[in-house]
Amino acid sequence: MNEIKLLDFDTRLFGFKVAMFMGKRLGGESSKRLIKECKDRGIRCCFAELDINDFVTLNMSAKDGFVISDIRMTFEKDLCNYRLRDNKGLKGYVIDKVIMNRDLPYLEALSGELSLTSRFEFDNNFPAGMAGRLYKTWMRNSIDKKTAGGMFIAREIKTRNPAGVITYKRYADYGKIVLFVVGQKHRRKGLGFRLLNRVSLCFKEAGIGKIRVVTESKNIPAQRLYEKNGFLTHSVSAFFHLWIK
């Protein structure tokens, strides 16, 4: 079976083998082959993004121990007619692209807040604190441009400390928001609006016609923010975790 891909990054981070099932549907035989291959290869956890509209797939996944961990919602915005809108009520903050060494603890703390709604935090089979560690690593990789191509930081003018951050990556026909979070105490002040504006303008100026972002179904505030800023639902998918005993 060649539909299981070992995830090197996750494996190194978690300390046990983690893989991804690359298919979208499961049948009786394919599910059994998947489980057998995981056992043969010493894989402890297998992720799967399955077709939630296929009854056979959902039936087999439940029967064979797949546990739903997240409903992922992808939002998309058309940038063809996009015009930069300013938030005149924004005070006490500035948007910056320059990252200083002293920013890292603040950025890691912001990524820790973001991890609280993740599927890794939701699934208690992962060791406590592992979700936060994962998101901190993603943040560092974004800063180093390993998982993102650029980022904008919202700073407090008085302290110069980061209050929000958005990282992004360019693909062939669309731009994608990788990490996006505004610190709890800095919300409802227009920072999310301003950061989304800056990234949207950045992609439009680069000739990119669409921008996408993925969030969890339980993250209602994020969904409302995207919809308020012109994003529409592009797709909905279900993420499952299979723990091999």
Image: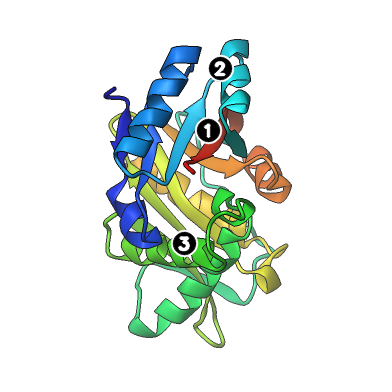
Amino acid on which disc 3 is placed: Tyr
Is label 2 or label 1 in front?
A: 2
Residue indicated by mark 3: 135
Color encoding of the figure: rainbow
Helix or strand or loop: what does disc 3 sit on? Answer: helix
Q: In the image, which disc is placed on residue 45?
A: none
Q: Residue at x 37, y 55 (%)?
A: 16
The image position of residue 244, as x and y in percent, is: 47, 41
Q: Considering only order in the chain, which callout, 3 or 1, is on the residue closer to the N terminus?
A: 1
Is label 2 or label 3 in front?
A: 2
Name the image quarter holding residue 140. Answer: bottom left
Q: CA distance from mark 2 to mark 1?
A: 31 Å
Q: Considering only order in the chain, which callout, 3 or 2, is on the residue closer to the N terminus?
A: 2
Amino acid on which disc 1 is placed: Lys
Residue indicated by mark 2: 57
The image position of residue 178, as x and y in percent, is: 43, 49
Left or right of 41, for residue 44: right
Q: In the image, which disc is placed on residue 77?
A: 1
Task: Give the class, few, some or many, for how many residues have Cα within 10 Å of label 3's Cα (few <14, many ≥20).
Answer: many
Front in this rendered view, residue 81 or 19: 19
**Would residue 204 be visible to someone looking at this image?**
no
Helix or strand or loop: what does disc 1 sit on? Answer: strand
The image position of residue 61, as x and y in percent, is: 57, 25
Task: Give the class, few, some or many, for how many residues have Cα within 10 Å of label 1's Cα (few <14, many ≥20).
Answer: many
Q: Residue at x 46, y 67 (%)?
A: 133
Left or right of 238, for residue 212: left
Amino acid on which disc 2 is placed: Thr
Q: Is residue 96 above or below residue 166?
A: below
